[in-house]
Amino acid sequence: MKSSSVFFIILLSLLTFSCADDFTNMGVEVQPTSDAIIVDTATLALTSENYYPNFMYSRPDSLLLGTFVDETYGTVYADILTQVEPPVDFSYPPGSVADSAKIILYYYTWFGNQYSPMEVNIYEMNKDTTFLYSNAYKSDINIFDYTDLTQNLSHRIFSAKDATIIRDDATTIEFPLNQDFVQRFSDQMKIHYTDNGIGNEIDNGVDTLDVAKFQKMFNGLYITTDFGTASLLYIRGVVLRYYFHYKYLAEGDTDSTTVNTYVNYPANKEVRTINRFQHPDRETVKQRLNATDTVNYLSSPTNVYTKINIPLKKLQDSINAKIGDKTLLLNRAILRIDATDIDTDPSDVTPILPTSIILIKGDTTSYNDFFENRDLPSNTTAILARYSSETNDTTDVTNYYYSFDLAPLLTNELKKHQTLPDTMSFMVVPVSLKYDGSSSIMEVKPQNLIKAVKLCSGSHPTKPMKLNLVYSGF
């Protein structure tokens, strides 16, 4: 009895193992080896180089004014051309008399040495050329198309720290305008300008000045600096303030009251303002920055960007060698760009790491078209990244980097091209972003404030730019 039980258990075990083997083999037979899904990784080396733009399209939210010389990135010289807008739904009271006028510059803060003196000169834009609101203007604009520099309205010598604080978030510098301008401006406005054909009647009977006709009479201001090499103002607003008085006789009174008041002509978003940038030592900077191929650079405004080249044909050939005729799926394609030599000393006057950068597919024309057409980021043409950081637990050193996922872009390129180009180029540009009320990006503009970072290039010895891929073939 005992012997029979042992034999039965052994026989049952053999049958069980036999069934299991047959089940596994059956699965293999249903899915032949040639149909197995392949999952693999790859790392692709990239090449990179510095690119030196001549201009950017100027639609600034804030403006730079002044000159700063940086040991690494050279000289940036910034000045401003701007129109001003006449007051809306406003008319001068009868008998108004001009008194004076001033230009007021409002600025957030400054970059550089707060005690370094600078001289600011303000000229009238006295040429017939007028800005068109819908046009895109370049930051290397020729000022002599707009002014001959013969009508200097005002000038001052001061340092950034000299300004009087009028509220928590702003400082001001005021420029009294000469009486010749005050009289000319008064004559141009003619105070009672309803009689000279430039007023528009509106429903409530108030006469308002046509903006286009106003700009024919007063084209705008050119604001520049003549000396100082160590500070830049971050201008947030420009206003032409016009002071006048008139006599007011209240009903039932026999004596009139003199009313002293003013009206503002602001450089606001309804008119065009252009920030012009010059880099007089550009060729010297090029030679210095190009002397090493282990580092690339980003520097704004319009100083140096980085161009990256991906060997697209090599990428396709290496993947096809592994997956054969299978359908390719790029699960991830991460381009990581490491920053290097980050200066975190707040007491040192150095450009600040750009918060956001954009990777634009194509050559210089594509880069220019993106900003001229006011395009938005897209995962197949222009990819946005913000800087990230990671701290080494052992050394307590923080590393900064930018990361882009190129999987959608590369998948799109591999699908649409029968014959791929050997390389695909990308331009890396520091940008500023504007958001709507739902925190969606509504505008991307080239960064026009002082920002800069050194990037580990494709040839960097320890942290080279590279493309890390995870892909499937099925």
Image: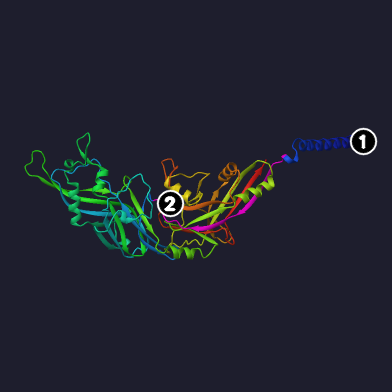
- Scheme of colours in the image: rainbow
Q: Residues within 10 Å of mark 1 (few under 14, many from 20)?
A: few
Return the residue nearer the eye: 303 or 5: 303
- Residues at marks 2 and 1 touching, judged by CB atoms closer than 8 Å: no
Question: Could you tell me residue 133's position as x and y percent?
Answer: 33, 45
Q: CA distance from mark 2 to mark 1?
A: 89 Å
- Which quadrant is home to the N terminus? top right
Left or right placement of residue 460 versus residue 152 in this view: right
Residue at point 79%, 38% (across, down): 25
Q: Which residue is mark 2?
A: 446
Residues in magenta? 35-57
Identify whether 187 is placed above or below 70: above
**Residue type at numbered disc 2:** Pro
Left or right placement of residue 249 versus residue 239 in this view: left
Return the residue nearer the eye: 348 or 175: 175
Which of pointers 2 and 1 lies earlier in the amino acid sequence? 1
**Residue type at numbered disc 1:** Lys
Q: Quadrant of residue 277?
A: bottom left
- Residue farthest toward the left in the current orientation of the protein: 254
Q: Which residue is mark 1?
A: 2
Question: Could you tell me residue 231's position as x and y percent?
Answer: 36, 62
Q: Residues within 10 Å of mark 2 (few under 14, many from 20)?
A: many
Question: Could you tell me residue 80's position as x and y percent?
Answer: 33, 55
Q: Quadrant of residue 352?
A: bottom left
Left or right placement of residue 318 versus residue 24 in this view: left
Magenta stretch: includes residue 45: yes
- Which quadrant is home to the C terminus? top right
Residue at point 41%, 42% (across, down): 436
Magenta stretch: includes residue 39: yes
Return the residue nearer the eye: 219 or 242: 219
Residue at point 65%, 41% (across, down): 327
